[in-house]
Amino acid sequence: MAPFSVLIVEDQARFRDAFEHALASVPDIQLLGIAPDLPQGRRLFDETRPDVLLVDLDLPGGSGIELIRHAAQVRPQCEVMVISVFGDEQHVVASIEAGATGYLLKDSLALDLPTQLRSLRAGGSPISPVIARRLLQRLAPGAGAAPPVVDDEVVALSEQESRVLHLAAKGFTFDEIAQFLQVSPHTVMTYVKRVYRKLHVRSKVEAIYEARRLGWLKD
């Protein structure tokens, strides 16, 4: 595969650093720049004209979906990879409709980013397994025929459990949430396990998805 260029638009410093580190020693991928917000992202995109755009959705100055649409209009040959904490159907579908061809969740950052970008550039559509499963469930025969069933336990989140869930949805790590709430990481993990049990999920991404589906979390 021929070398290609990448532009990153991400507002959180720890993710910017992680992405930059992942691409730093990769000879076939040229990192053209990193923008922390939508206006700078759009300016850098127009200046650098990358082959691949790696973009978050929740950005200062607007939604990353605006940049995806802009990229599709001015440089349709550019591949777009979304990396976000949002795994709900609304964000995924809106991103794909705007022109994204890959969608990864930030919970999946153990992934080999260069390999995922190469796959995207080669014509693939890398997508986090939890998102793929949700989309397949929606497309399955009979999907949507009955309203979701919510048992009585699901509606019993405590105030602290709800706060932890909201902070996690904003992209904070569990250690950061512990510091913010002034409790121990062990206490936070206790809240997290209770949320998982009540929502019948096994990961933070699934918990956020279910909470959004139930209307407990808003954009």
Image (cartoon, helix red, strand yellow):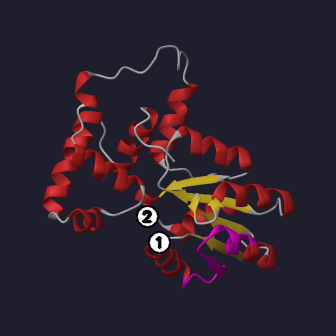
> Looking at the image, is 49 positioned above or below residue 100?
below
Q: Is residue 165 magenta?
A: no
Disc on res. 202: none
Tell me: 143 left or right of 200: right
Measure the C-alpha gap from mark 1 to mark 2. 9 Å
Mark 2 nearby-residue class (10 Å; few <14, some 14–19, many ≥20): few
What residue is at 23 percent from the left and 32 percent from the top? 156
Disc on res. 109: 2
What residue is at 19 percent from the left and 49 percent from the top? 191
Along the line of sight, which residue is nearer the eye, 190 or 63? 63
Residue 159 position in % (x across, y down): 23, 44
Residue 41 position in % (x across, y down): 68, 72
Tell me whether circle 1 and circle 2 mark residues in contact (CB < 8 Å). yes
What residue is at 65 percent from the left and 48 percent from the top? 95
What SS does tag 2 mark?
Answer: loop
Residue type of the residue flagged with mark 1 = Phe
Mark found first going from the N terminus, 1 or 2? 1
Q: Which residues are magenta?
A: 24-42
Residue type of the residue flagged with mark 2 = Leu
Along the line of sight, which residue is nearer the eye, 208 or 79? 208
Along the line of sight, which residue is nearer the eye, 159 or 75? 159
Badge 1 is on which residue?
A: 15
